[in-house]
Amino acid sequence: MEQTRTLTPRTAVLWAVLRAELDRRAGEQLTVLDVGGGTGGFAVPLAESGHRVTVVDASPDALAALTRRAAEAGVADRVRAVQGDGDALAGLIEPATVDLVLCHSVLEVVDDPAPVVAALVAALRPGGAASVLVAGRAAAVLTRAMNGHLDVAAALAADPGGSAGPRDTLRRRYDAEGAAALLTAAGLAVEEIHGVRVLADLLPAAVADAQPAALVELERALAARPPYRDLAAQLHLFARRPA
C-alpha cells in the first residue's frame, strides 16, 4: 500500500505507523472505522489492501466523493459511507466490532472530545488499535508569532485549551501529554506518539518543493524525537484497547 503511493510530510509518518500495525496482523481482514475520513484518503488504500472500512463523516459531498473514489479503485464492496459527526459516534457504530479506528483531525473540532474518545474505545474490540491525529499547540503559537500575530500567539499560549478565541477555526489544540492523558482516561494504552509536519509548515515553499524526498525522510527521522516532535503542526498518537 505505502509503496504504491506518493508520501508527503502530511502522510509519511501516519502510513509508517499504520503499516506496522497491518504487518503485525498480516493475513487478517481487519474491520476499520475512519471517523472524519472525508473523501477516503486513508479508507480507499486500506480497502485496496483487503480490509473493510466504514467512513463516518458529516459532509455528504465528501461521502459522495468517497463512494466515487472507492468505485474507481474497485473496492466499493469494502467501503461503507455513513453520514454523521464525531459527537454522535456512539449511536452509529456497534460496540466491540472494530479492529482499527482512525480519528484524524476530529478531536479539535467536536463539542467535547471525552465522549468521542469513549465512543472510539467502545467501538474497538479488545486488542484493537486507535490512530488519533490532533492539532499541536506549540506549532500554532510559533506560526502565529513568526507571522507577526503576537497577540494571537499570546492568546493561544495562555488559553488552557489552546484556542485563540471565538474566531479560531479550532476549538482546542493539544500537547503530547494532554492528548495522551485524554486517551488514557478513556481506557486506551498509548504506545507511540509522533509529530506530523515537524518542519514542513516552517520551511519556505521553495525549499520544501525543491527537496520533497529529503523533507519526507527528515520528517520521519524527527517525528518521534522530542523536542522536535512537540513542535509539529499535528501530533499522532497510536494507542490500543487492552485485550
Image (cartoon, rainbow, N blue to C red):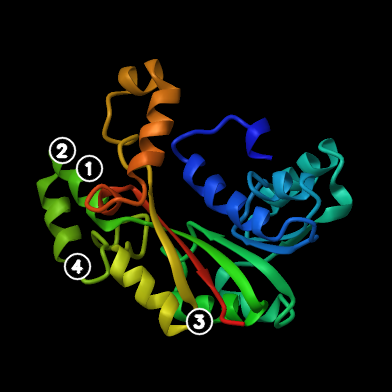
Image: 17 above or below 108: above
With respect to residue 159, does 24 lie above or below? above
> Where is mark 1, residue-wise?
143
State yes or no: discs 3 and 1 in contact (Cβ < 8 Å): no
Q: Are marks 1 and 4 in contact (CB under 8 Å)?
A: no
First reached walking from the N terminus: tag 3 or tag 4: 3
Q: Secondary structure beneath disc 4?
A: loop
Q: Residue drawn at (56%, 67%), measured in percent from left and top?
A: 130
C-alpha span from label 3 to label 4:
22 Å
Q: Which numbered disc covers residue 146?
A: 2
Residue 170 at x, y percent in the picture: 37, 58
| Residue for point 15% across, 38% down | 146
Instruction: Report the disc number at residue 159.
Output: 4
Provide the secondary structure element on which disc 2 rests. helix
Q: Position of residue 56 (x, y in %)?
A: 67, 62
The three-letter amino acid code for the residue at tag 1 is Thr
Say which amino acid is labelled 2: Met
- Within 10 Å of disc 2 (Cα), the crowding (few <14, some 14-19, many 20+) is few
